[in-house]
Image (spheres, grey):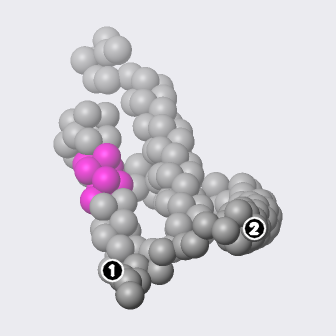
Amino acid sequence: MEDYFGKKNMISSVYWEWELLLLSIKIGIGFSFLYDLILILRMLIFHVSWMETLEDLVYWVYVTANLFQLQLTKSSGVLRGFSILGVILGMSLYYIILGKTIHKIAQKEILFLKRWLTEKWKLFKINLCKQDCDLKNHRRKNGTKRNSGKKEKTE
C-alpha cells in the first residue's frame, strides 16, 4: 500500500512486524515444547553424557536452521532483532507458564511407570522361577534325570 507520495503505508509495515513477532513467539513456544520432549525421553531412557551432548547439538542445529529459514522467508534475509527476541520470549513464556508444571507431572508419571514396570518384572521373574521349580519337581517324581552336560560312566 502506497500513499499519494509513493511511500509505503506505515500501518501495513507495523502490522507485518507484529505478525512476525507473534510468529516468532509461537515458534519459540514450539522449540521449548520440543526440548521438553527430549528431557522426558532422557527421564525414560538412560543416556550416557556423550549421547545427551549429541542430542543437544542436534536440537540446537535444528533451532538455528529454523530461525535462519524464518529470517530468510519472512524478512527477506534481513536479521530482525525483535524476531530473535520474540523466539526467546516465547521460550521463556512456555517455561514459566507450562514448562515447570509439565516437568513435575512427567517426573511423577515416569516414576509411577518405572515402579509399576519394576513390580511387573519382579512378578514375572517369580512366576518364571516357580515354573522352573515345578518342572524340576516333576522330573524328580517321574524318575527322569536331568542331564547336567557330563557324560555318565558306563560300567
Q: Is residue 39 magenta?
A: no
Mark 2 and mark 1 in contact? Answer it, CB < 8 Å: no
Depth check, front residue: 69 or 139: 139
Q: Which residue is mark 1?
A: 50
Corner quadrant of residue 59: bottom left
Q: Is residue 21 visible?
A: no
Residue closest to the eye, 13 or 57: 57
44 on left or right of 63 = right
Q: Is 87 rendered above or below residue 155?
A: above
Tell me the kind of residue under disc 2: Lys
Q: Amino acid at mark 1?
A: Trp
Which residue was labeled with disc 2? 141
Q: Residues within 10 Å of mark 1 (few under 14, many from 20)?
A: few
Q: Nearer the viewer, mark 2 or mark 1?
A: 2
**Which stretch appears magenta?**
60-68
On-image quarter of the C terminus: bottom left
Above or below, comparing residue 88 to residue 19 in the picture: below
The answer to which of marks 2 and 1 sits earlier in the sequence is: 1
